[in-house]
Amino acid sequence: MFNKRLNQFQNVAAGQMASLRISPEDFTLVKIKLGLSGTTFDKTKIDRVVVKIGAKTIWDLTGTQLNKVNNYKNQADNAKYLTLDFTERDQAIFPVKQVGGLDLMSLLPVGEVYVNVYISATAVAPKIDATGYFERTQDNPFVTKFLPYSWTQSASGRFTLPLTFRGSLLKRVWLFYNGTDWTGAANGNIQSVEVKKNSLVIHDQTCLDVRFDQSEYKKVPQSGLYVVDFIVDNNHDAHVQTIRNTNSGQVFDSFEFNAMLGDAGGATVSAIVEVLDTPTNL
């Protein structure tokens, strides 16, 4: 892996959307590191991060969500840096671990890659320096996507979350919630999650249980977050297929995400679906 400085961000100012164009090159972009400086500017003053290929959005997270994703994956935590990692860093086998990186020349029929960073109005004289990390071209048809679904809780009890996958390869579902947070000995507002694929249960754990398993595999549970992690053991091939072959052709699998919520109401669940997908599908 080699690295180099990327183009300058444009429109870097408080309360604005700063934009970075990634120059098309015959390499695979596996990671972007944002170096943050200025009078008063760090990653807590990034409101949102969006990555696009042409007009197609492939990443859409708040700054807080992206920071929790990185911290859960046990990446370095420094207020002056924010990382966008398109790969699976802790997967043991190369080049499989790099699947999800952006093959820049292969993506040109869809469009060039842009990174948009929404800067908080409270930042003072912000500055962003971007470094790209690259591997050789892999002719990989998939890219890593982080796509949002929001849902408002009206009462406690069991609720089915409105998630769709359309044939993508499902890695994780990140369930960010407000309301009662978990503690070392108690569940949070999302008390448990059951996942069914074609009516077969493939995940069924309480908040306490899932955090124990994640800690065993050196993940770091985050406040206000329940993660359904199908590759928690760093086995890249454990992702969940969401399409199958039948006698009549390929059909999308049916999924049911059932969350048991404990708070009486007024809470919001923001789901981020992390998938491997073709650039134009989801």
Image (spheres, grey):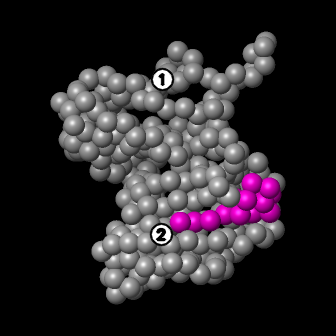
Q: Is 105 in the magenta?
A: yes
The answer to whether residue 171 of the structure is visible from this angle is yes
Q: Is residue 243 left or right of residue 261?
A: right
- Residue 179 screen position, x and y as percent: 22, 42
- Residue 37 screen position, x and y as percent: 42, 83
Label 1 residue SS: strand
Q: Is 5 in the magenta?
A: no
The mark nearer the N terminus, 2 or 1, is 2
Disc 2 versus disc 1: nearer the observer: 2
Residue 212's disc number: none
Which residue is at the front of the view, 208 or 250?
250
Q: Residue at x 69, y 45 (%)?
A: 280
Identify residue for label 1. Answer: 256
Number of residues whose C-alpha sits closer than 10 Å to that of mark 2, classed few (under 14), some (14–19) or many (20 or more): many
Residue 122 vs 183, above or below: the answer is: below
Query: Outermost residue toward the left?
Result: 264
Q: Is residue 124 left or right of residue 127?
A: left
Range covered by the magenta-colored residues: 102-116
Which residue is at the front of the view, 181 or 165?
165
Label 2 residue SS: strand
C-beta proximity under 8 Å, tags 2 and 1: no
Residue 97 vs 228, above or below: the answer is: below
Identify residue for label 2. Answer: 17
- Residue 18 screen position, x and y as percent: 50, 73
Determine the image quadrant of residue 277. Answer: top right
Q: What residue type is disc 2 on?
A: Met
